Image (cartoon, rainbow, N blue to C red):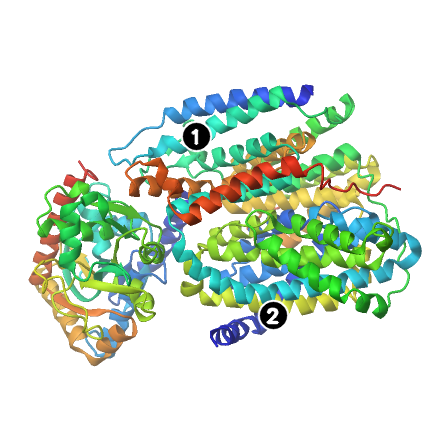
Amino acid sequence: MDILANLALGFSIALSPYTLMLAVIGCFLGTIIGALPGLGPSNGVAILIPLTFALGLDATSALVLMTAVYYGAMYGGRISSILLNIPGDEPALMTTLDGYPMAKAGRAGDALVLSGVASFVGAFLATLGLIFLAPLLARVAFLFGPAEYFALYLLAFCTLGGMASNNQAKAAIASCIGLAIAMIGVDESSGLPRLTGGNLHLYDGVDFLVAIVGLFAITEVFFFIESHGKHSSLGVKLDKVSIPWKDIIACRWVMLRCSAVGFIAGVLPGAGASLGSFMAYMSEKSIAGEKGGFGTGVAKGIAAPEAGNNAAAGGALVPMLTLGVPGSGTTAVLLALLMTLNITPGPTLFTENPEVVWGLIASLLIANFVLLVMNVPMVKIFVRVLQVPPWVLMPGVTMISFVGIYSLSGSYFDLLLMVGFGVLGYIMRKLDIPTVPVILGILLGGHMETALRRAMLLSDGDWTYLFSSPISIGLWVAAVSGFVAPMFLRNILKKPQRVTD
Amino acid sequence: MKYKKLKVMLLSSLLILGVSGIALAAECIAPANPGGGWDFTCRQIGKVMYDIKAIDKPMQVTNMAGAGGGLAFNHVVAERNEDAELIVAASSATTTRLAQNAYAGMTADQVRFVGSIGADPGVIVVGAKSPFNSLGDLIDAVKANPGGVAFAGGSAVGGFDHLKALMVMQRAGVDDITKVKYISFNAGGDALTQTIGGFTQAMTGDMSEVVGFLKSGDIRVLAVLTEERVPGFDDIPTAKEQGIDVVAVNWRGLYIPKGVSDDTFKMWADRLQQVADSAEWKKVMVDNGLAPFTKVGDDFQSYIDGIVAEVRTMSQKLGVIQ
Amino acid sequence: MQSDRIFGLVATVLALAYIVSANQTQISFLTDPVGPKGFPVLIGIIWALSGMFMVLRPDPQPEWPGLRTFGALAFAVVILIGYAYALKPLGFLLPTAVAAGVLSYQISPNPKHAVLTGIGLSGVLFVIFKYALGLGLVAVPKWLLG
């Protein structure tokens, strides 16, 4: 059993007191970040990356810490959904549909515990899925040449873009902006500068962390200034917390089904956690039918999206680790982390850095149990965090972002760039243009170009080479349909709006 | 990123410089950060030299990273030209860069190459399912259709992995080496994966890069670019056996300042020979996947002169340098 | 309607400018069939096409804030830019206190809270960054101390 031996290796790394401590800290920070309105897994992880460098952690430790934050934020996201009717992040949107009504009905504690358990089931099963699926996918990677990689990257843009926006042209613009930014800097193969406008600061290209923190954190500050932080008073009081065994048992099949649905959604490149929770909720809603009472605060309506989005979070790690293609905004941020640590995700990661992969997987399992403990008996601590007023929180987030980016390069230029990305993010979100494709573009642009150039070098400039294998044709078909299909399905699968008081 | 790193390296090396001036014992400069191949060379050779009493004080190792070894090279040429107690770690990357003028105009004859006592052998690899069963098959295929065989490698265009493919093809009588297709990857592992997948037809790299895949049975090593077969890999034929006289190894060796006396040169050559002959060093080599590659003194200097000349001609033909 | 049209137009113009500047890239002697220009130009074309699509088929107008809020946002941007420039010459404490205070006031216009937030955040964050994370921050530059 290779897997057992590998897991043993993983646990031998993850169970060291130091790594364990990092996992616990990461879970704690992550849950707080997820719970705070306006801070989700993406910007939470993004802000913390520069600080991880400041700590001088080695690759494995940094990865353990950040994935613990990632999982923690996925757990924490539900707290503000249920208590404030504000999703901490996009995937938690579906949890507001039944979570908030249930909390208003005086069962806030039950809703929190049930969603915590559902999160655990989803994340746990997804981690198991990752353990079994990832090594297989690593073998599949032998089938991926430059043409296939190019099509795969394209698929990531198409599905993510298709899902993230209601207007394909807008998703395409966002992707192009990201890709265009990725081209800035010295061209790797010729060593000559491109598109820098002669500005020396741009010779190294635009650091993706600058873009991520700008687009996520700084943009959020602008939105808070616009709304004067209206949506932040604690809407529901939480009295006692007990374990609603009856509901948990009643939801057991829902959790299992939704974990599977979420995991599959997560594995699809570019689809990610939002799709996972959406599909989980919608499928359970149609199984339950009219009598199920979805949307009125039923237990199944809470368990379904939470199991779904946490499973998707785990599933999204599969393409990220094995192919280097992130399955969601947050995994894109984690990919950024890996790349900064000089680890190239991809098929060789499993053979060349087994300690990184299996240490990560083992610590995910550990983090999951830690999170269950933190989020069920200790949930009250995190509820208190919600009482931090936005006029303290958002300036704090801004200052941390500034210092984090400043510590990367010590250059004011990066800070200006970050503010610029903040403004861009504000305009884009106002116009309903998704920002995640920008990040994806900056992250994958270089790889995508290299894949294209290698493919053309191999084929002596013959463009048909891009569609010459069954895999690449399949990926192109999937990419095109992933981009086009949402246009037609949009009327059928209309995203449910947030319940309003 | 690259520029930032360079800045940090320059700064840190300046700091180290300030401290290291006081050292009395022999000093070995590793022109890279701790953990790399050059650092390994300094530390292991230094340790064995002290263990076998070739030197009477422990070797002092200084890391001086920057400009791919150029910073250290410049430091030695400009400031330590007559320092008899100084050795510097080098490898084929050093000579490739010197030959390609990547050290800002400095040339290989500004220092003395004193010896090499181990090497990571160059290899030419195909996937297990490849139709090529010998180096001859591969060469015939390139001769028949140069565009049909793409070599993958972990070094940049014009780097050592690229040159390995070219050297072999040139010796085999392929006239226009610019026609030989080479695709550069960020690491040897990626190049191998593509070759196993059949997207590229062959891969050039170092033995240490391919050992994992060799054990798993995914690849076949067509030729190892050494004088003799590598111990531990006795079933892999050399290119020389197959009629292609190319020796391209990533050797691990040392250079010393130009301005030292011939006696000093001989002293270091002797010490290296003692290390090479020691049981301690043989263990170090086995533990780290190195093949024996002992050339010391004038013998080594003439080997280097040959390599530099060959790489320069080849790079000119290729257009990497003017 | 209008917003999308304007954005689409700006995007198209930017994309065309991008294509032009990509075309000015130097080409080295070692080149491949695509070269360093190919991919950027391809991106530029798709970018311009999508921009034009936005001009032709705009979505409904989003809810823009009033002129006063815009003023506030612009001011916030100015403050952040100023903060970026001030961080090095003026040290950490002073610019952070000012910037955090202003942002806090902008989110919730309560002067007392804002002052407390500014001072509190700059102090607490400085301690965390300097002593827990070991970042080389300068509290107050020497020339300010005299």
Q: Quadrant of the C terminus of chain C?
A: top right
The relative height of residue C9 versus residue A448 in the rendered view (above or below) is above
- The percent position of residue A201, horizontal first and vertical second, equals 45, 35
Number of residues whose C-alpha sits closer than 10 Å to that of mark 1, classed few (under 14), some (14–19) or many (20 or more) = few
CA gap, disc 2 and disc 1: 47 Å
Can residue A214 be seen? no
Give the image quarter of residue B40.
bottom left
Q: Is residue A58 depicted above or below A100 in this figure?
A: below
Tag 1 secondary structure: helix
Mark 2 vs mark 1: in front: 1
Q: Is residue A42 left or right of residue C22?
A: right
Q: Is residue C82 above or below residue B59?
A: above
Are discs 2 and 1 located on one and the same chain? no
Which chain is mark 1 on? C
- Vertical position of residue B84 compared to residue C40: above or below: below
- The x, y position of residue C23, in whole percent, is 38, 24
Q: Position of residue A378 (x, y in %)?
A: 79, 66
Label 2 element class = helix
Q: Disc 1 designates what residue?
A: C42
Q: Amino acid at mark 2?
A: Leu
Q: Residue B73 appears at what percent x and percent y?
A: 24, 51
Q: Is residue A61 left or right of residue B219?
A: right
| Rendered residue at 22%/61% (across/down) | B123
Q: Mark 2 belongs to which subunit? A: A
Circle 2: is it few (<14), some (14-19), or many (20+) Cα within 10 Å? many
Q: Amino acid at mark 1?
A: Leu
Asked if the residues shown at circle 2 and circle 1 are in contact, with their CB atoms under 8 angstroms apart, the answer is no
Residue receiving disc 2: A20
